[in-house]
Image (spheres, rainbow, N blue to C red):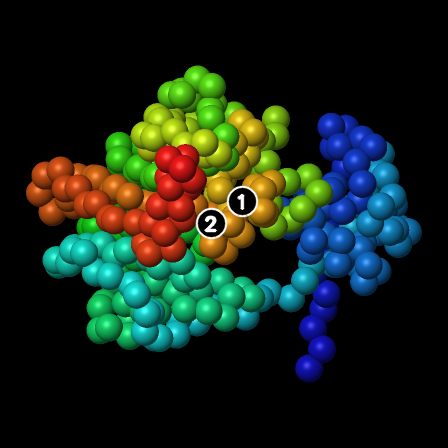
Amino acid sequence: MSTVPDIRTLPVPDGLEGERVDAAIARMFGFSRTKAAELAAAGKVQVDGAVVAKSERVRGGAWLEVEMPEPAAPVRVVAEPVEGMEIVYDDDDIVVVVKPVGVAAHPSPGWTGTTVIGGLAAAGYRVSTSGAAERQGVVHRLDVGTSGLMAVAKSERAYTSLKAQFKERVVDKRYHALVQGHPDPMSGTIDAPIGRHPNHDYKFAVTAEGKPSVTHYDLIEAFRSASLLDIKLETGRTHQIRVHMAAHRHPCVGDLTYGADPTLAKRLGLTRQWLHAMKLGFEHPSDGRWVEFESTYPEDLQSALDKVRAESNA
């Protein structure tokens, strides 16, 4: 049975004067630039009644008409064991895990690999039912290519408490990162807003239109070609450490997405960014006591660190 198309029409704000059609759609309707470009290519975008290409420029006050895409199918949680995922703490309210590299925090459209939530389900854990169906219990995330500590809420009170603690920035989140070169100063703060990259939908960047983002770093050890940093996040933007360090001209070793040297990564045997969530501390949801968890480096990161240290001592 056919359905009536969902067509939305809005006037282009004066502030978007001269923007490309796909950029204007993304800003006005909340789509990614990729999705906006797809809609334009399919002839589902009109300006003042005429179909337009994604690259055309809009003028303030013009009427932008978009045929909305069909709602995406719900993402299901698949109970599937996660090799190498370590449970470091478990009680009635929370479970704390060490997420391996190559594993997502939760299911998402297009992701076909394993997830922390699916791994917990396969192991018989029941988590909080708060939040979107595919994110139940997840109060913070790590990139697929980043390993380390994650806390998942099992009870509703834990979900509410942890979400509030992350929002109020009282959670102690610390990472270790091996970055190229030697930051100057050796300890400091990077305070720069982060948003979607203007040209690459899968990347993020420091941009004036981004959200406030603050990263604190301290030098642990300096090597000939790299520096090992202790990093504390004040905010939790997607790819925050990777974006801030790259913008500071010291990308994480192995992070080819954000401009790291591929020859150094190959020499150290790295196939992902050298970044690990080392420490996680917060107030326990049941009684308010402070709890802290720490994790050691996984084998690939330890091996790369040993090699860069040996090169420096040679």
Q: Residue furthest bottom?
A: 1
Classify residue 112 as left or right of residue 68. Answer: left
The structure residue drawn at horizontal position 45% and vertical position 31%, both measured from the top left corner, is: 224
Q: Residues within 10 Å of mark 2 (few under 14, many from 20)?
A: some
Q: Quadrant of residue 129?
A: bottom left
Q: Position of residue 264 (x, y in %)?
A: 53, 44
Mark 2 to mark 1: distance in Å? 6 Å
Question: Residue 22: in sight, yes or no?
Answer: yes
Q: Which residue lies at the image location 76% right of the left edge and 47% below the top edge?
A: 22
Q: From the top left corner, tell me how far across and down residue 218 is, in percent.
A: 35, 26
**Badge 1, how many Cα within 10 Å: few under 14, some, many 20+?**
some
Give the label on residue 46, or none: none
Q: Is residue 305 visible?
A: no
Write the residue at 51% across / 49% down: 267
In this figure, which residue is indicated by the disc labeled 2?
A: 268
Image quadrant in which you'd find residue 77:
bottom left
| Cβ–Cβ under 8 Å for marks 2 and 1 | yes
Q: Camera-side residue: 130 or 116? A: 116
Q: Quadrant of residue 261?
A: top right
Q: Quadrant of the C terminus?
A: top left
Question: Is residue 283 shown above or below 127?
Answer: above
Q: Give whichever of 168, 278 is nearer the camera.
A: 278
Residue 165 percent location from the top left of the image: 27, 38
Q: Going 39% across and 74% down the picture, which residue do you hit?
A: 78
Q: Secondary structure at mark 1?
A: helix
Of all residues, the one furthest to the top in this rendering is 185
Instruction: Give, as a three-letter code, the residue at label 2.
Output: Leu
* Residue topped by disc 1: 264
